[in-house]
Amino acid sequence: MFDAHLHIIDPRFALPGNDGYRPDPFTVDDYRAHAEALGVTGGAVVAGSFNGTEQDYLIAALRELGPAFVGVAQLPPETSDSHLRDLHAAGVRALRINLVRGPAGDLDALVQLGMRAAELLNWPTELYVDARDLRRLAPRIAPLPRVSVDHLGLSQEGLPALLALVGTGARVKATGFGRGDLDVPEALRAIAEVNPGALMAGTDLPSTRAPRPFDTADLRLIADTLGAAADPVFTANALDFYGIAETGER
């Protein structure tokens, strides 16, 4: 399995927090202890709102995890091209825009950054967004050439807007099932029907601030819901999205 969404909280590095929230440490060793039984062969380490925009912890995590893992960075709009290239050399392969707990006022500038990262390095942009907001935001995110949406878009009400975005080529992370109010099997089937290559499974470990944390039953739910169509959801779809070779190395 390629774990398409996980977080690392390393106490060796500053943790700015978000609205006063600072999670407990969850180190690379902690992650490995949880992931061993899942058969994880690689994954995407995603910057959380609480990590801030300094990515030293992310680079350190990628160095420890090895070349089967990639990073998803949270960056300020003024990030230079040279810094983007340095991050790419360290294993970062995507930009994250957090519209649930991030600075929504910077969206247009962050979209410009995402477009620049896509042109320079072929990075996609990952959106943490409540799908209820997608119709309103669609004109502003439309310039981004490749996007994904975290945690099935969080909301049942937003599912039609999410499916419309999937119809334009967007990917969706099958993660964080305890974060929203979705009928998860319904959402999985609906997304797969629009585009069987859209879904990417992940653990969301350590499930910071989630009302219900990740459980291995979440992965079984994906398999049971999608049947034979679930196989690429666990590995191939994410490898394609992040531009990882079939060997599992960036």
Image: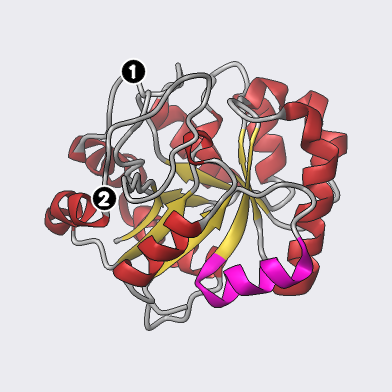
The one nearer the camera, 63 or 171, is 63
Where 3 sits versus 219, above or below? below
Coordinates of residue 3 in the picture (x, y in percent) = 35, 55
Dot 2 falls on a residue whose secondary structure is loop
Residue drawn at x 29%, y 22% as measured from the top left = 212
Q: Is residue 91 magenta?
A: yes
Q: Split into 4 quadrants, where in the image is the N terminus? A: bottom left
Q: Which residue is labeled 1 in the image?
A: 211
Q: Residues within 10 Å of mark 1 (few under 14, many from 20)?
A: few
Residue drawn at x 51%, y 26% as measured from the top left = 18
* Residue 41 position by quadrant: bottom left
Asked if residue 196 shows in the view, the reply is yes
Region of the chain picked out in magenta, as a range: 80-92
Label 2 or label 1, whichever comes before in sequence order = 2
Asked if residue 122 shows in the view, the reply is no
Residue drawn at x 63%, y 22% as measured from the top left = 158
Q: Residues within 10 Å of mark 2 (few under 14, many from 20)?
A: some
